[in-house]
Image (cartoon, rainbow, N blue to C red):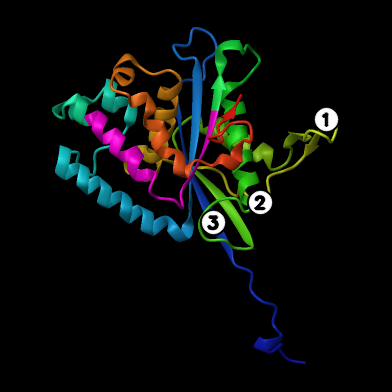
Amino acid sequence: MGWPSEAQSEPAISTDMYLMYADESGDCGLHNSPTRYFVLSGLVVHELRWQVYLEELISFRRRLRKQHGLRLREEFHASRLINRPGDLVRIKRHDRLDMIRQFASFLGTLTDLSIINVVVDKQKKDLPFDVFDTAWRTLIQRFENTISHHNFPGPANPDERGLILCDHTDDKKLMALIRRMRRHNPVPNQPGFGAGWRNLPLQYVIEDPSFRDSAHCFFIQAADLAAFLLYQRLAPSAYLRKRAGHRFFERLRPILCTKASRRDPDGIVWL
C-alpha cells in the first residue's frame, strides 16, 4: 500500500514547556527556629519567552553595573545584599536596597512571567508535620494544575509540560518527593464533593528537578528575590521596615499567579 501521503498524515501536536525556577526564604525547622515562616516561590517562564527574557535580565544587570557597580558575574542574592554582602559591601547599603527595589519593579514589567508563592506558617505546626515536604508538594501541585488548566500567561499550545529548576536544597528529598507524586499523589476533594481524596499522579510536570547553582542563573536569582520580598512583607527586618522595603513585594503584583489560590488576592497559598 505504501506510506500515506502527507495530506493523509495526522496533524502534528505541538508540545511546549514551562520552566519553573524555584527558591526559598526562611528555614524548614519547627523547633528552635529563628523564623516563623517558610516561603517557597516558583517563577514560571514559557520556553518560547525564555531567550527574550534572558536578554532582558542581562540588560537589566548591565544597568545595575553602570549605576551601582554590581558585576554581571556577581550573584544577586537579596538577603545577603542586605545582611551579609561580603565583597558587595563596597556598594552602600541604601544602594543595595535600591537594587532590590529596581529588580522587583523590573520583573513586574515582564508580564509573561508568573510567580507561584507558598507560605508555611510554622507557629502552630508540630511534628510530624514536614515543612519542606508540604511546601514543595504544594508548589509542584499548583504548577501541575496551572499547566493542565492553561492558566499561565504567554504562548498557548494544546499540550504543555513543565520542568522544575532550583537552587541546591535537600536535593535527594525533593527528587524522591516528585518521583512519589508520579505514582501516588493524594489530592483532597474539592468542596461539594464530600470528604476524602483522589489519587492524581503528576501528568504535566516531567523529569527530576534540575539543580543549579543560583550564582550562575539569573532566573533562580529572580525567584530568590520573590521569596525574600514575600518573607519581608510578613516579617520585615527593622531596616527594611524603616525603608519601606516590606512593601516591595507589591511591585511583583502584575506577575503573581492569582490562580494558585482563590483564598488570597495575590494567589498566595497559605499552609
Q: Residue at x 54, y 26 (%)?
A: 119
Q: Earlier in the sequence, mark 2 or mark 3?
A: 3
Kindly indicate whether the residue at mark 2 contacts the one at mark 1 (C-beta within 8 angstroms): no
Q: Amino acid at mark 1?
A: Gly
Q: Earlier in the sequence, mark 1 or mark 2?
A: 2
Image mark for residue 17:
3
Out of 169 and 103, give the one closest to the viewer. 103
Residue 137: where, in percent of width, then height? 62, 33
Around disc 3, counting alpha carbons within 10 Å, would you say few (fewer than 14), some (14 to 19), or many (20 or more)? some
**Residue located beneath label 2 in the image:** 148
Give the spatial CA distance, label 1 vs label 3: 32 Å
Residue 234: where, in percent of width, then height? 46, 21
The image quarter containing residue 105 is top left
Is 82 left or right of 254, judged from the image as shown?
left
Q: Residue at x 62, y 54 (%)?
A: 150
Secondary structure category for the residue under label 2: helix
Q: Amino acid at mark 3?
A: Met
In the image as oriented, which residue stretches furthest toward the bottom?
1
**Residue located beneath label 1 in the image:** 196
Secondary structure category for the residue under label 3: strand
Is 239 left or right of 115, judged from the image as shown?
left
Out of 218 and 246, give the one closest to the viewer. 246
In the image, the segment drawn in magenta is 96-118
Around disc 1, counting alpha carbons within 10 Å, would you say few (fewer than 14), some (14 to 19), or many (20 or more)? few
Image height check: is 50 above or below 242? below
In the image as oriented, which residue stretches furthest toward the top?
32
